[in-house]
Structure formats: structure tokens, C-alpha cells
Image (cartoon, grey):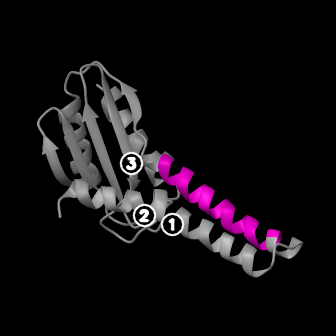
Amino acid sequence: MDIEDKIKKQDRFFLYILPAFFIGLSAYVFIMLEFDSLSLIMVVPFLLMAISFHFKHKANISFKKIQSNGEGDYDKCIALAHSKGWEILATEKKQKIVAHTSGTWRSWGELIIINFFENCLLVNSRPSPFKKASIVTWGKNRINFRAVEAAVKSG
């Protein structure tokens, strides 16, 4: 299975399957408790979980833009990946870097995708689909994004 297929499989799980499970669970509880006030109290947390899983993962898969002058950004990002100990999974010269971080106490690991354009970079850091499934990384995505931003803006 190639990298893109693995990523898309986990995206479908967190965007659609898990929220659908919680919606179905809430409908089941609502029907089994015969539509009374207790059933509403039981259903609300399941619906909130469904909504939060969907929107949190949608935020995880969005790319953030970094303005740059375009000169040497690829080499700076490769150097950053090596200095941080990121495993480079795939690379297209001057177009794209896909890297994987190791696990820490904050997360199981993150997948970092950097797309290069003439005057900007699109960066995504998200929970890794190659490790245990997770929806949060306790700030590691922001740390990775800021590291890429600092590397590009330096020098």
C-alpha cells in the first residue's frame, strides 16, 4: 500500500466512519430509551463527539501557507528534517517532501507534508497514519509547523 492510500484510508475513518458510528449510536440510544428526556441527555454527548471528531480531523488535514522568497526552501526543509531526526518517506525534487516524526510522550508520531511553490509553501503536520490512530498530538503539529516556518524565514 503506498503512502497516499494509507493516508486516505485513515482520513475516511476519522472524517466519516467514526462520526457515523456516534450518530448511529445516538439514534439507537434515542430510540431504545423511547424519546424521553433521559434519552436526550444520553444522546447529546454522542452527537458532540461525532461533530468534534469530524471537524478536528478536518482541521488536521488542512494545509497552512508560508510565504517565502522561493530560493533554497527545499534545501532548508531537507536540512531541518535531518536535524530534527524526521524520516523522509518521499520527496520530489523542489516540489514536495513527505516526512515522518518519531513518537514522543505527546503523540505517536506525525506525518509532515511540505509542498513547494514559487513564492510560498503549503505545510501540513498531522497525526501519522503509520502509527496508532489518533486525533490529537498535544501541540506537536504546531511545533512542527513553526519549525518549518522558522527554517524557511531564516537566512
In the rendered structure, are the residues bearing label 1 and label 2 in contact, judged by CB atoms less than 8 Å apart? yes
Q: SS at mark 2?
A: helix
Q: Residue at x 41, y 66 (%)?
A: 104
What label sits on residue 18 in the rendered view?
Answer: 1
In the rendered structure, are the residues bearing label 3 and label 2 in contact, judged by CB atoms less than 8 Å apart? no
Q: CA distance from mark 1 to mark 2?
A: 6 Å
Magenta stretch: give its range: 40-58
Residue situated in front as seen by the camera: 151 or 131: 131
Magenta highlight: main SS: helix
* For marks 1 and 2 on the same chain, the one whose residue lies earlier in the sequence: 2
Indicate whether residue 48 is drawn in magenta: yes
Q: Position of residue 53 (x, y in %)?
A: 56, 59
Q: SS at mark 3?
A: strand
Q: Which quadrant would the C terminus be assigned to in this image?
A: top left
Query: Relative to residue 63, is residue 98 drawn left or right?
Result: left
Query: Relative to residue 17, is residue 93 drawn left or right?
Result: left
What label sits on residue 13 in the rendered view?
Answer: 2
In the rendered structure, which amino acid carries the disc numbered 2? Answer: Phe
Residue on which the image places disc 3: 125
Foreground tag (3 vs 2): 2
Q: Position of residue 4 (x, y in %)?
A: 24, 53
